[in-house]
Amino acid sequence: MIKKLLVTAVLATVMAPTMAAWDLWDEFRVNAVENGRVIDRSDSRKVTTSEGQSYAMFFALVANDRASFDGLVTWTADNLSGGDLTKTLPSWLWGQERGDKWGILDTNNATDSDMWIAWCFLEAGRLWKDPEYTKKGLAMMELLKKEVRVVDNLGAVVLPGRVGFEDNGIVKLNPSYYPLFIFKRFALEDPYWNDVYDGSLRMLLRSAPAGIAPDWALFDKNGRLVPPDGVDYEIGSYNAIRTYLWAGMMSPDDPNRRRLLKHFEPMVEATKALNMPPEKIHTVNLKVNDTGPFGFGACLMPMLGNDRTAGLIRSVVVSEPLTGDSYYSSVLAMYGRGWDTGRFAFDRDGRLIFPKGW
């Protein structure tokens, strides 16, 4: 009997997760998450976004924190999706309306967040061996298909939301909404998403002819980039910075990672010149203003390697606390630092892997 108990204990030790709790997630969870809700305290309305919820789901999954993951899912479904994420994509913005009234502030959705949530469900189902999560992910993928448009000579792309992104054959896209590894993961379940991967890759390259991603880009009915006119289209800033993060975190086994990093070299050079990514950079003439916040630095870490600039940026990023007061920089830092330290990575099919164990 004693021998049997010893064998059982050894097997349990071998099969148990081998990595300690993720200190970055613990810090962020304590400072920015309340009852399953990520609070952006930099906004006076103390808003919660579907973006913040989706990112936190990812971090909870990486940390193997199922209780927090489920709490985030429940809050998101109940408050942003009418109780069921498999039937309604979440509204993107919730917060204080006026006085003591709280609720949805904008009913439109944000498909980048929707894709992250669906991806998290698929990976939660795989890693925690629970088919109920997988079913939810597959259901959200079907809802997302309604937001896909096929643009001639560009291909299949996901509109950023249900409302406001297509007009007389012109589509308005956000390059930072397209982590290509998400489409790789979706394609394991449904080959439909291979075309979306291909169209999104073309969009990323075509939207940045000078190697600088814009915050927003317009494409005409023939798939041509509409010449940028106006700050949204001429400048790469708080939206565009994530484009480099997603590209840098792609698997080295995906040949398009190398292609994208080569294409975006002008942003790397601008970063090296300032020892930090610029807060704003012109997508045509490459003029820059001041340096961006610490989260911007985290976004370039996967592209920079181990040179002097990378070392300087790492020293800044790791010194900053992760809080709701600096919500956006904090979540970007968690992605950049987590990937940089080997806490997580993505394989060539967009699945979550743990170089140092889970």
Image (cartoon, rainbow, N blue to C red):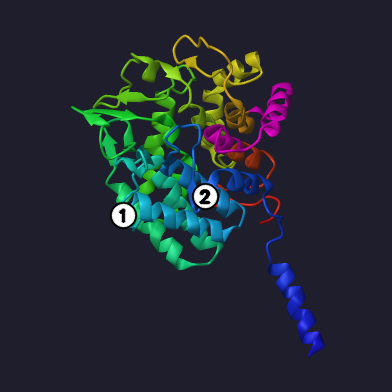
Q: Residues within 10 Å of mark 2 (few under 14, many from 20)?
A: few
Q: Residue 328: give x, y in percent of width and height.
A: 52, 34
Nearer to us in this view, 145 or 278: 278
Image quadrant in which the C terminus is located = bottom right
Instruction: Quadrant for residue 276, please give it.
Output: top right
For badge 1, the amino acid type reads Gly
Q: Which badge, 1 or 2, is on the more N-terminal residue?
A: 2
Q: Residues within 10 Å of mark 1 (few under 14, many from 20)?
A: some
Residue 315 part of the magenta segment: yes
The relative height of residue 26 versus residue 154 in the rendered view (above or below) is below
Give the magenta part as a residue range.
304-333
Residue occupying the point 43% across, 54% down: 75
Instruction: Quadrant for residue 13, please give it.
Output: bottom right
User: In terms of secondary structure, where does tag 1 sit?
Assistant: loop
Nearer to us in this view, 144 or 196: 144
- The label shown at residue 34 is 2
Lateral position of residue 139 relative to residue 335, left or right = left
For badge 2, the amino acid type reads Glu
Residue occupying the point 69% across, 68% down: 15
Lateral position of residue 85 relative to residue 58, left or right = left
Residue at image mark 1: 82
- Residue sitting farthest toward the front: 99
Q: Residue 92: give x, y in percent of width and height.
A: 37, 41
Rounded to the nearest angstrom, the CA distance separating label 1 from label 2 is 20 Å
Q: Residue 205: give x, y in percent of width and height.
A: 44, 26
Residue occupying the point 62% across, 38% down: 322
Q: Comparing marks 1 and 2, which lies closer to the viewer?
A: 2
